[in-house]
Image (spheres, grey):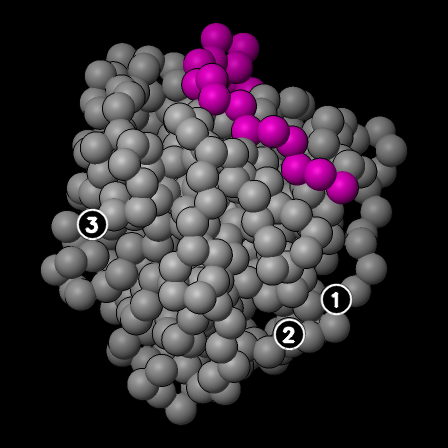
Amino acid sequence: MATLAGAATATWGSVARHSLPASSFKSAYSFSSSFWSQPSLLRLAFVAEEKKFQREGGFVIFARKKSGFAELLFNRKNEQQGEGSQRPRLQRGRVSPRLDVPANILRPPYVNSLQAPDFVEDYQIQDAEGIVGMKAAGKLAAAVLSHAGTLVKPGVTTDEIDKAVHQMIIEAGAYPSPLGYGAFPKSVCTSVNECICHGIPDSRALLDGDIINIDVTVYLNGYHGDTSRTFLCGNVSEEGRQLVEVTREALDKAISICGPGVEFRKIGKVIHDIADKYKYGVVRQFVGHGVGKIFHSGPSILHFRNSEPGRMEVNQTFTIEPMLTIGTIKGRMWDDRWTVVTEDGSLSAQFEHTLLITEKGVEILTL
């Protein structure tokens, strides 16, 4: 699950950081922020300094995910169509009641809290036991995601996908990590078409030609495994297919350069270079993050060119999860405080893996 390049509580991204445009701040790209109840107000707590800024008539937030998925507040528009197509804008459906989890299943400490946990700066370096736990969690998350993908067909609702994911996770003795994270009401994130991330499953049926990102995180025996993939529903346009394939390519190439001692900033350069080749936008508000016993921690993995410090360490676990767009990278948050869609209605795609840095390179734990 992506974390906000700022606080997940304007609600953008997994509990990670979000990045700031270099033009907006002199020092860091990332910062922590907290989401306030009023939809018109966000308060940001920066690592280096605290600062509020205004741009184009609205508060814009690019931050490190201090807690929760990712978050951001933007100017709102009410376009009814996606830019450059006859595709209708995404409309919310009815959200069904929260599903139950058997009492014997171990729960993350944040469950039942209305607040997402604070962002932990420390890297998560695994010992031998931790590596075993992370591999098991990653393997389960991958299996659940693959099963969820088989359900992507016209007429199937995202609520049905959520129920299938939920059932498979609890049958494996695990807990669906998103459920109850910062009051998130469902067990998986389903982000359709222009939804950048953190879509809440509901009664809307998938349509022929949709693309949908399914973001699965499981909590198994005290460890989180986090992965996502964008699937094609029926006959998807060439424009949509290319976006999905290029986003997958961006993740794969970013993973290929990982290894002990590698600078994290190189991830952003690889992804940004590929996006530029196809004239796609790279979403800055949501970032990858450390993962392990804690859902979201340092480092914040920026998917765009940056000069942030930090190097990969042996036995470290984290996610890379680029989000690319055909049009604008600006997002608009729905009043559910989770769902973030592109401001112009253009398509967005995302892929994610949980990684383990080894002495010889990198291992993908969510295959």
**Residue bearing the label numbered 2:** 92
Labelled pair 2, 1 in contact (Cβ < 8 Å): yes
Where residue 145 appears, x then y in whole percent? 53, 50
Cα–Cα span, label 2 and label 3: 31 Å
- The amino acid at mark 1 is Val
258 with respect to 337 (left or right): left
Structural crowding at the residue carrying mark 1, measured as other residues with C-alpha within 10 Å and reported as few (<14), some (14–19) or many (≥20): some
Q: Nearer the viewer, mark 1 or mark 3?
A: 3
Confirm whether the magenta stretch covers residue 191: no
Sequence-wise first label, 1 or 3? 1
Q: Is residue 254 above or below residue 313?
A: below
- The amino acid at mark 3 is His
Look at the image and tell me in which quarter the C terminus lies: top left
287 with respect to 310 (left or right): right
Where residue 255 appears, x then y in whole percent? 27, 36
What's the mark number on residue 272?
A: 3
